[in-house]
């Protein structure tokens, strides 16, 4: 009886894991179908723009634009996560608490500047291309990560940290083994918000020569071709939904793992 119960308990997590990854997988498959199928959907887009000479964006393959878009967002996310989480950790330590208001204000300042203004200021310094949009995404995506890192670390109960110190853990060990694991779902929520926002914001890079999924949108606006606009916007939306559902699944897994530990 005990053996069969144990087997049932082992099967449940695997079924749960499949459910967790179902939505991201479905959105990802739909994204791939869209990227591969748009070049063959001329009849559909011709219905939207019957008078246009060309209704399928052909200056670059959509899979190439998708790869460049993800590269820009990913590069900005890596730097932003490192800076945002690192700053949040630093100002929640004893030596850095005096700088907590300053870090929070600086992070908030990044979102007060519209990305277009950041691009206009960055282009004379960095030139046209990928670097200006990466800088804009870093500034725009910093606030959610810093804010959630602070909230997650500050929500860790003092009794838990006291118990860890009583067990002989050093401050670094408490941070690594206690605070960060407990704060991980909240920090991941900030990363999720930052990345999802920047997926859409990255399309502005097309205005400064950074080729990505914003190319068909900008070309469609300039030429008055709504088919181009819809093609770029549709792929960006599916990419955002794929990554957002992936982060949601990761958050759910983290919460379940934390709830499995006795308090």
Image: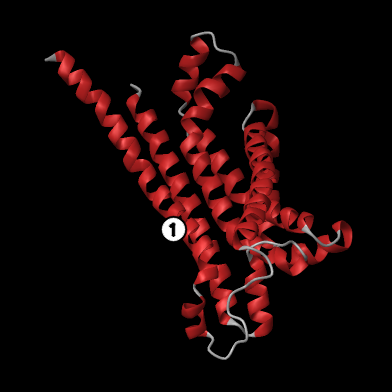
Looking at the image, what colour scheme do you see? secondary structure
Q: How would you rate the neighbour count of disc 1 (Cα within 10 Å): few for under 14, some for 14-19, many for 20 or more?
A: some
Seen from this angle, which residue lies furthest left? 1
For label 1, the SS is: helix
Rendered image quadrant of residue 4: top left
Residue in the picture at 67% in, 84% down? 223
Residue lying at the far right in this picture: please name it: 125
- The quarter of the rendered structure image containing the N terminus is top left
Q: Quadrant of residue 109?
A: bottom right
Q: Position of residue 161 (x, y in %)?
A: 50, 21
Q: Say if residue 164 shows up in the picture.
A: yes
In the image, residue 111 above or below residue 162: below
Q: Measured from the top left, where is residue 141 in percent x and y?
A: 63, 52
Q: Position of residue 117 (x, y in %)?
A: 75, 67
* Front in this rendered view, residue 69 or 108: 69
Q: Is residue 59 above or below residue 86?
A: below
Residue that protrudes farthest toward the bottom in the picture = 51
Where is residue 158 shown, x and y percent of the image?
Answer: 48, 25
Image-based side of 57 in relation to 18, left or right? right
**Residue at the farthest front position:** 40
Q: Which residue is mark 1?
A: 30
Tell me what residue is drawn at x 59 percent, y 62 percent: 200
Which one is nearer the viewer's eye here, 168 or 132? Answer: 132
Residue 78 versus residue 28 in the image, above or below: above
| Quadrant location of the C terminus in the rendered image | top left
- Is there any visible trace of residue 105 in the rendered image? no
Q: Is residue 31 left or right of residue 173?
A: left
Residue at 69% x, 40% y is 83
Residue placed most toward the observer, 66 or 3: 66
């Amino acid at each position: 009886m005990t053996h069969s119960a144990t087997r049932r308990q082992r099967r449940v997590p695997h079924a749960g894991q499949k459910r967790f990854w179902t939505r991201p997988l479905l959105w990802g498959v739909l994204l791939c179908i869209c990227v591969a199928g748009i070049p063959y959907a001329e009849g559909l887009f011709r219905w939207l723009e019957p008078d246009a000479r060309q209704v399928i964006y052909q200056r670059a393959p959509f899979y190439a634009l998708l790869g460049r878009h993800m590269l820009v967002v990913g590069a900005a996310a890596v730097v932003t996560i490192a800076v945002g989480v690192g700053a949040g950790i630093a100002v929640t330590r004893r030596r850095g608490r005096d700088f907590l208001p300053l870090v929070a204000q600086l992070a908030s300042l990044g979102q007060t500047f519209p990305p277009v203004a950041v691009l206009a200021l960055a282009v004379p310094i960095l030139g046209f291309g990928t670097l200006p949009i990466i800088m804009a995404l870093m500034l725009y995506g910093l606030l959610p990560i810093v804010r959630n890192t602070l909230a997650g670390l500050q929500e860790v109960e003092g009794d838990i940290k006291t118990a860890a110190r009583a067990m002989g853990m050093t401050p670094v060990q408490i941070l690594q083994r206690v605070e960060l694991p407990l704060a991980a779902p909240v920090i991941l929520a900030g990363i999720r918000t930052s990345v999802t926002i920047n997926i859409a914001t990255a399309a502005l890079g097309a205005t400064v020569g950074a080729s990505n999924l914003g190319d068909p949108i900008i070309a469609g606006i300039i030429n008055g071709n709504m088919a181009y606009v819809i093609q770029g916007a549709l792929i960006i939306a599916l990419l955002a939904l794929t990554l957002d559902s992936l982060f949601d699944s990761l958050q759910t897994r983290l919460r379940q793992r934390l709830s499995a530990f006795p308090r």
